[in-house]
Structure formats: C-alpha cells, structure tokens
Amino acid sequence: MLCYNCSKPTFKIFCKTCEKEFKLLECKRRILDDGLEVISFYKYSKIKKLLNHKHFISGYFMLNKLASYSYKRFHFDNELAYALGLDDDCSSGYSHTAILIKNMKSKNIIPLYNAIKAKNKIIYKGKSLLFRKKNKRKYELQKTLDLPVILVDDIITSGESLKQANLVLKKAKIKVLFAVVLADAKV
Ligand SMILES: [Zn+2]
C-alpha cells in the first residue's frame, strides 16, 4: 500500500520518513476568550492533507495512528478526569473524536463516549465566525458527570464549538480543565 501522507510504497499507514515526522509533536497552546486553554499537537499545515481521509474509512486508521503518536503520549497526573469528545459528523461510519479519546485512556483519564451531543447538526467548515455565532450547535449533556472534564476535538479554527461546549458544561457546574486538539488552524 501507499503512505497516507506522501504516497510512497510502504507496508504501514505511514512510511518511515512520515512516521518519524508525525512522532515529532509541536505542542502549542491558545487561550480562548472565555479563558479555555487549548493544547494542540501539530501544525495545521502538517496534517491538512491527511484530513481528506476523514470522510473515508481510511481516516479511521489514519486518525488512530496519529492519535497513538499524540493523544496516547499525553500525560496528565493531576487528578482523575473524563475525556469528552465533541460530537461529530459520523457519516463516514465512525466518530473522529471517539478515536481520539480512546487513545487518551490512562491511569487518570477516563474516555467517556457520547457524553455531549449537538442538537443542531450544522457544519461549520468553511463558514464565517458570524455564521458560527448565529448558528449555535446547541450542545446537550447526555450523562451525569462526577469528575472534571478534558474536552477533545480534532481541529480548532475559531474555537466556537469548544466555547459552546465549555459553556454548557459550566452551566451544569462541571469543571472543564482544558481542551486538547490535533491541530490548531490559527497557530
Ligand atoms: Zn510518507
């Protein structure tokens, strides 16, 4: 088969060169205007091309691999917390954020699936900030949470989705520690 990133022949998802490159994380942080800290693992430009796989089953293997290099290596020792993936479009047959939170499972992090759902299945990709603000996702909590939360998504652009989810959790008196994403389109 061919490397998912550079199309060189390989027996794995990524060729040796790309594997080495993706194992190298460039962690960045951004503080959103509601105070939420967002940690990202990659430069958006580095993984942009790979994201085309997201709409196909190949994206499942690609995301799982990337998450094993990034989310899996994420250490968090402070306290016990849930990892909550933002509800996403499952038309490709799998949830992107479910793959990411599965990889975060550790002594202190418990992945919690389908805990927050968007009532409004609007697609934000390519839409303006004004559009995003006017058309809220309307997140709803599906579970009772007794621990603080780490919010998880794949890409952050305006931060509008994370902020909306953060607000819903805040209103339910649940502590949101920070958010973790694969890449930040703005840093
Ligand atoms: Zn490659």
Image: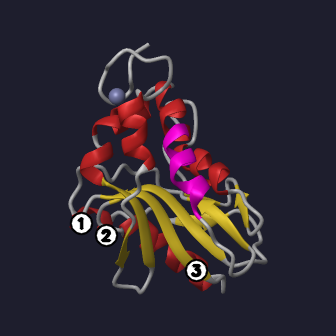
Residue 154 vs 147, above or below: the answer is above
Total count of labels: 3
Residue 34 placement (x, y as % from top left): 40, 85
Q: Residue at x 71, y 56 (%)?
A: 105
Q: Amino acid at mark 3?
A: Leu
Q: CA distance from mark 1 to mark 3?
A: 25 Å
From the viewer's side, name the closer residue of 139 and 83.
Answer: 83
Q: Which residue is mark 3?
A: 177
Q: Amino acid at mark 1?
A: Leu
Give residue 39's position: percent from left, percent from top.
44, 69
Q: How is the image coloured?
A: secondary structure
The question of residue 135 being in magenta is answered with: no
- Whole-number angstrom distance, CA of label 1 to CA of label 2: 6 Å
Q: Looking at the picture, tell me which residue is in the foreground, 112 or 135.
A: 112
The local crowd at label 3, few if under 14, some if 14 to 19, many if 20 or more residues have their Cα within 10 Å, is some
Counting from the top left corner in percent of width and height, residue 19 is at 43, 37
The residue that appears at 50% across and 17% down in the rendered structure is 11
Q: Earlier in the sequence, mark 2 or mark 3?
A: 2
- Element assignment for label 1: helix
Q: Is residue 20 above or below residue 83?
A: above
Q: CA distance from mark 2 to mark 3?
A: 23 Å
In percent of the image, x 42 and y 86: which residue is there?
Answer: 35
Magenta span: chief secondary structure: helix
Label 2 sits on what residue type? Answer: Lys
Q: Is residue 138 left or right of residue 136?
A: right
Residue stretch rendered in magenta on the structure: 65-74
Query: What residue is disc 1 on?
Result: 129
Q: Which residue is mark 2?
A: 133
Q: Nearer the viewer, residue 179 or 90?
A: 179
* Whether residue 150 is situated above or below residue 46 in the rendered picture: below
Residue at screen point 59% across, 84% down? 171
Image x and y of residue 97, in percent = 55, 50
